[in-house]
Image (cartoon, rainbow, N blue to C red):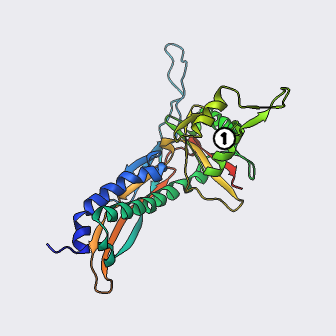
Amino acid sequence: MADTLATNVAEITQELIDATVMQMPQVAPLMNLVERKDIPNGRNSVEIPRANSTFSVQTPTEGDDLVNPSQFDLTSTTISPTLRAINVRVSERARYFSQQDILQFISQELARAQGQDVDTDISAEFSNLGQSAGTTNTDLTIAVLREARRKLQANTVANGGPAPDPIYTVLAPIPVENLMTNLGLQGVVPNGTATGQQFVSQGLSEEFIRQYFVTGINLVGVGTFWDGYLTEDGSSDFICAMYAKQAIQLAMSKDWDMKQFEESEWIGVILRTVADYNSGVGKYANWGVAITADGA
């Protein structure tokens, strides 16, 4: 077989797919922090059902009829996928590099592009969550996360009841930095000593300084993650979130694939990856809290 770029790329196509899939969760955390719903062939959407009624307990007197029956009602949310594609042209001059170089660089960028698209699609649903915390143009503090956790715990039965575990918090990098400052990540803090300053004392703040917010760290009883793909709104704020995994669904009709083409108009090969998916708040909106945090 001729040693051409097309041959080299064809030989590692499956490796490219595997490497891209493996790297996506590392650069885009949200895909693993929501509920995935696969759309089978022959369907153009997925319907997410939820109960739309509550039952009440009666205390009848012996021998009396039950006169206040409860009724079970269902409602649902429909999520329809959106077709997505990436077209990558690889120059013939790439054959000057090894297969491993081609595999590494193409898979890294595909993982970023595909992962970012999934992440931004999911994070756009944060503004559709039913509860809110935080204030515009105000730095994020641990008190805001504490408030958000309380709101999920105190959610009324009519709105789905207390949010079920697992529950996650997802924050943008600037709110993370402000939160760490609020927790004591400042090097020195005011103290009533002779010098007037001291390093952070042992305890919670010291532990955060040591870890500097390792992904998945537990805050107010909730696994907390940072996501670099969250975008600012029109007020220079980030809309972050604390939510139950079941609150947001990623409806996947077709996962990312990859095919190779050659065309006369381009000296090299063309890689085309296609997917079909969308996300939505499919169950109870109050199982999530949209957290407004300053992005300046």
Return the x and y of residue 275 as percentages of the image width and height.
37, 63
Specify whether 249 is left or right of 174.
left
Instruction: From the viewer's perspective, tell me whether residue 23 is left or right of residue 16.
Output: right
Spot occupied by residue 276 in the image (x, y as percentages of width and height): 38, 62
Above or below for 95 versus 51: below
Q: Nearer the viewer, residue 61 or 187?
A: 187
Q: Position of residue 82 (x, y in %)?
A: 43, 64
Asked whether 104 or 241 is in front, the reply is 104
At x 39%, y 49%, the residue is 37
Q: Residue lying farthest bottom? A: 265
Query: Dot 1 corresponds to which residue?
Result: 180
Q: Which residue lies at the image location 47% right of the left edge and 55% below the top edge?
A: 279
Q: Which corner quadrant holds the C terminus?
A: bottom right
Q: Image quadrant of residue 251?
A: bottom left
Does residue 292 show up?
yes
Quarter of the picture containing the N terminus is bottom left
On screen, 56 above or below 145? above
